[in-house]
Image (cartoon, helix red, strand yellow):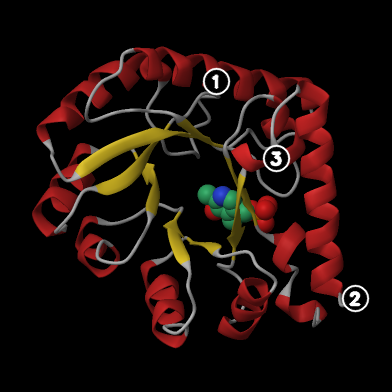
Amino acid sequence: MGNLQKRIQEIKENISEACNKVGREQSEVTVVAVTKSVSVQRAAEVVHEGIINLGENRAEGLVQKQRDMQDSDVSWHYIGNIQSRKVRDIVGDISYLHSLSRKSIAKEIQKRASKPINCFVQVNVSGEESKSGVSPENLESFINELADFDKIRVVGLMTMAPNTEDEALIRSVFSEMKVLRDRFMEKNMPHAPCTELSMGMSNDYTIAIEEGATFVRIGTALVGLESEGVR
Ligand SMILES: *Cc1c(COP(=O)(O)O)cnc(C)c1O
C-alpha cells in the first residue's frame, strides 16, 4: 500500500471509530479532501483512491484543478474567503460553497449563478478576530435575509475550531454549532433546509464527528505535504 492509501485507510478507521462511539453511521459523514496546497497530480491520486469531494480555498487554484481534471468525476467544494469579483469564476462549477458570511457575496452569487448554489453559512463561534464568519447572535437575521436570493440554498452551517490544543474548548465550539444547526433545521425554511454541518479538519475531525459533523474538511492528514513526496 502506498503512503496515500495508508493515510486514507487510517482516516476511514478513525471516522468509523468516532461514529461507533456516538452511534452514528459512517455514511452520514462526507470527507472533503482539501487539496489547496498540493498539485493537480496529487489531487488526481486522491480521486483515484475514491475520494471524489475536493476542497480548494482560492479561485485560481480551483479553476486550474477543474481545468486539468476535467475528465474526473469530482465534486468541487469552495472552502475559503471569496472576493466578490471572483465569485463569477467559481460559481458555475462547484457543488458546495462552505464560506458564505457576507451579504455582498450573496448578491454576487444571485447575479452570476444560473442555478441555486448549495451554501454553508460560516459561523464564527469563538469570536476570534482573525476568523471570518457570522456571529451566533447575527445568524438568524443573516439566514432570514438570504431568503431573498433564490440562487442560494443554505444547506447547513460551517465553522473552523479555535486554534488551540484545548480539546474541551474545541469540543464545546462544535457542540454549540450542532445546537445552532438543529435550531435552523427545525424551522424548515424552504431556502434553508440546514441539515448539514461542515466542521473538523486534520487535527480535530474525530471530535467534530462525535459532535455531529456531516462534512469534514481534511487537508494535510489526507493529502500530505507536497514536499514529502507522498505516493
Ligand atoms: C486548509 C483548510 C482546511 C484543511 O486544513 P488541514 O488542517 O490541512 O486539514 C479545512 N478547512 C478550511 C476552511 C481550510 O482553509
Q: Which residue is mark 1?
A: 178
Q: Amino acid at mark 1?
A: Lys
| Secondary structure found at label 1 | helix
Q: Which residue is mark 3?
A: 26
Determine the residue positioned at 56% across, 65% down: 52
Distance of label 3 from label 1 (alpha carbons): 18 Å
Residue 28 percent coordinates (x, y)? 60, 37
Q: Of the residues tagged 3 and 2, which is closer to the observer?
A: 3
Name the foreground residue: 173 vs 72: 72
Image quadrant for the N terminus? bottom right
Residue at 78%, 51% (x, y): give it: 12
Q: Amino acid at mark 2?
A: Met
- In the figure, 87 relative to 174: above or below? below
Q: Residue at x 38, y 56 (%)?
A: 95
Badge 2 density bin: few <14, some 14–19, many ≥20, Cα 10 Å: few
**Local crowd at mark 1 within 10 Å, few (<14), some, or many (≥20)?**
some
Label 3 vs 2, first from the N-terminus: 2
Q: Is residue 194 visible?
A: yes
| Marks 1 and 2 close (CB-CB < 8 Å) | no
The answer to whether residue 193 is left or right of residue 34 is left
In the rendering, which numbered label is found on residue 1? 2
Position of residue 222 in the picture relative to residue 92 (left or right): right
Residue 171: x and y in percent read: 70, 23
Of callouts 3 and 1, which one flags the residue occurring earlier in the amino acid sequence?
Answer: 3
Q: CA distance from mark 1 to mark 2?
A: 37 Å
Residue 170 drawn above or below residue 77: above
Quadrant of the rendered structure where residue 9 is?
Answer: bottom right
| Residue 23: numbered disc | none
Q: Earlier in the sequence, mark 1 or mark 2?
A: 2
